[in-house]
Amino acid sequence: MSRKPKTFHGGLHPPDSKAASADKAVEICPLPDEIIIPLSQHIGAPAEPCVAVGDSVCRGQVVGEARGFVSVPVHASTSGEVVAVEARPHPSGRDLPAVVIRPDGRDQWCDDLRGLGEDELAAESVRNKLCACGIVGLGGATFPTHVKLSPPPEKPIDTLIINGAECEPYLTTDYRLMLEDPEQILDGVRLFAGVLGRPRIFIGIEENKPAAIKVIDAACASSDIEVVPLRVKYPQGAEKQLIYAITGREVPSGGLPMDAGVLVQNVRTAAAVSVAVRTGQPLIEQVLTVTGPGVAEPKNLRVRIGTPLRHLIDACGGFNGEPGKIILGGPMMGTAQLSLDVPVTRGAGGLLIFRQEDVDPRPEGPCIRCGRCVSVCPARILPTTIVAYARNDQVETAETLGVLDCIECGCCTYICPSMIPLVQFIRQAKGAIMAQKRNA
């Protein structure tokens, strides 16, 4: 590889721990006995249920309607009977409203799903199709894609970046998708470009994935899409860091990527966009890496939305030892789970199982002013100073120190020798500030 890899300020390089699943092709996970479709699976207003107990539903049918512009519908991921509309365990740690379906085993699609023809790809038609199909950002943010593709006229987008970095340790879903479905990804990229008015296009991939770079490079050979190798460093895939690494542009404090004229989408989102536009099939499945030392056989699984986590572990041969920590997502930005009854949602990219002996039991100690958290912070803020104010409920001062610029990557917590949960305190402070703004 002769191209010099690009990168950003700060960050770190934890062990990637991807070897257990990187070479394993994506398998289809069997259907569970019960599907739980949360009505809240995206940024914005939760969906409103539109089915009742006793209703029969088909695969792809809307079971929760969007409420407002920043919202999307949710769909049945298989055919069957609605057996409950009630609060169920959610990845957020709370019980939230969900539609519960008992599969009928037929897995029958709705017969009115329809894609767009080549003469129907006007920007508005594509955005409407993506909204109807419930397409959201699958890199973890779950922001509705049709909203992201609707920048105001005064903020034109001239650059599209497709994120294939997958910098979180352990996760290999984007990697496998790039190897196994490059044409589907590129079709989604072209659909994005059509909506945005033909921007310059980059696909960023970390240089520790040479096989993926080779495959995507070959698929892009006859196009003007540029594949950019990125230095192996976390959080290389974060939006603002990816934009800076590839274009040299900085998103202003408090701003969005469109303030720098850029739109960023994940490779899995691009593939989902292709499926939705070409076939009309909604987003009802997700590819997850199920891995970690606490699972018997790590795998990459194609899973129906609403599948309980317990079912994924069973599909991977069960636990390997006594589980000590279960994380939905990556180890840096994922969320610890307290129940295996939690279902897979659109934002999930991995399920990590750690044994009791893998979890560091050391308690939090005092800050020793080593400055490591500052040196690795990609947002260039002062984590320990901000946390000192946040712990004393001085969130206004924390805001003046730039707490809202924190991207919650977790580098500060990872590097802290005193085991201070810095990003967790920062997240609380951000939540308090946003609550104050909503109530003002």
Image (spheres, rainbow, N blue to C red):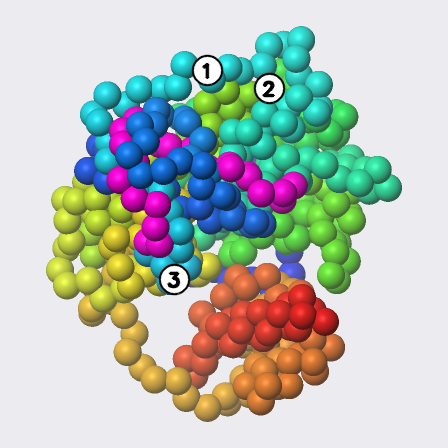
Foreground mark, 2 or 3?
A: 3
Q: Position of residue 70 (x, y in %)?
A: 63, 44
Identify the residue at horizontal 63%, vertical 10% (top origin). 118
Among the two numbered marks 1 and 3 on one chain, the one whose residue lies closer to the N terminus: 3
Q: Which range is magenta?
A: 65-88
Badge 3 amino acid: Arg
Can I make out residue 333 in this image?
yes
Residue located at (41% from left, 14% from top): 111
Q: Is residue 175 left or right of residue 72?
A: left
Instruction: State the image coordinates of residue 328 (x, y, percent, origin top left).
Output: 36, 54
For the point 65% across and 61% down, the residue is: 9
When asked about the image quadrant of residue 26, the answer is top left
Residue 77 lies in the magenta-colored region: yes
Tag 2 near tag 3, CB within 8 Å: no
Q: Which mark is residue 112?
A: 1
For the residues labelled 2 and 1, the Cα–Cα distance comes to 37 Å
Left or right: 390 with respect to 248? left
Q: Which residue is mark 3?
A: 94
Within 10 angstroms of label 3, few (less than 14), some, or many (20 or more) residues?
Answer: few
Which sits in the foreground, 426 or 209?
426
Q: Is residue 181 above or below residue 86?
A: above
Task: Kindly identify which numbered label has been placed on residue 221.
Answer: 2
Query: Quick check: 15 above or below 47?
Result: below
